[in-house]
Amino acid sequence: MKGVILNKKLTSDEKNVGLEFFLKFLILPTRSGLYGFAAFFTLLIAAKFFWYLIGFKDWFTVTVDDVIISLLGFAIVFIVRIAQNFKTASW
């Protein structure tokens, strides 16, 4: 008995849906999160440097704790961006 084998190829619309999902829920939130990280880190460094210039601190140091606190900036902005994308998603 002979059968017919049909190959289902993805159309360009189906490929675009996957790419759009990847961009909306991974790439763009990650980029926004990095901006949030940079903003928090810059603010912390500027504040520490200001305290050093005024004379409240004897030395200017950047510690691992500053990086960990800056990760909060990444997480907050990442989550907000994901929430916005879910809100505006057209499924």
Image (spheres, rainbow, N blue to C red):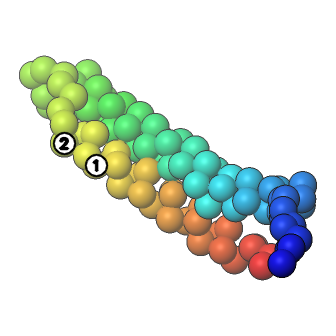
Q: Residue at x 18, y 25 (%)?
A: 61
Disc 2: which residue: 65
List x then y, in percent, for residue 77: 51, 57
Left or right, residue 44 beside residue 34: left
Q: Is residue 4 above or below residue 72?
A: below
Residue 79 percent location from the top left of the image: 50, 65
Measuring 59% from the left and 71% from the top, which residue is drawn there? 83
Classify mark 2: residues with Cα within 10 Å, few (<14), some (14-19) or many (20+): few
Residue 87 location (% of width, % of height): 69, 77
Question: Please, is residue 52 above or below residue 40 in the view?
Answer: above
82 or 9, which lies in front? 9
Q: Furthest residue to the front?
A: 1
Indicate the position of residue 5 as horizontal and vertical percent values: 84, 67
Location of the C terminus (image quadrant): bottom right
Element assignment for label 2: helix
In the displayed structure image, the side of residue 46 where residue 59 appears, left or right: left
Q: Does residue 54 show up? A: no
**Location of mark 1 (residue):** 69
**Residue type of the residue flagged with mark 1:** Ile
Nearer-the-camera pick, 62 or 77: 77
Q: Is residue 36 visible?
A: yes
User: Residue 65 or 12: which is nearer the viewer?
Assistant: 12
The answer for how far apart the CA atoms under marks 1 and 2 are is 6 Å
Amino acid on which disc 2 is placed: Asp
Label 1 Cα neighbours within 10 Å, binned few <14 / some 14-19 / many ≥20: some
**Residue visible at 74% across and 54% down in the picture:** 19
Quadrant for residue 8, please give it. bottom right
Helix, strand or loop for disc 1: helix
Which residue of the protein is positioned furthest toward the left in this rendering?
Answer: 58
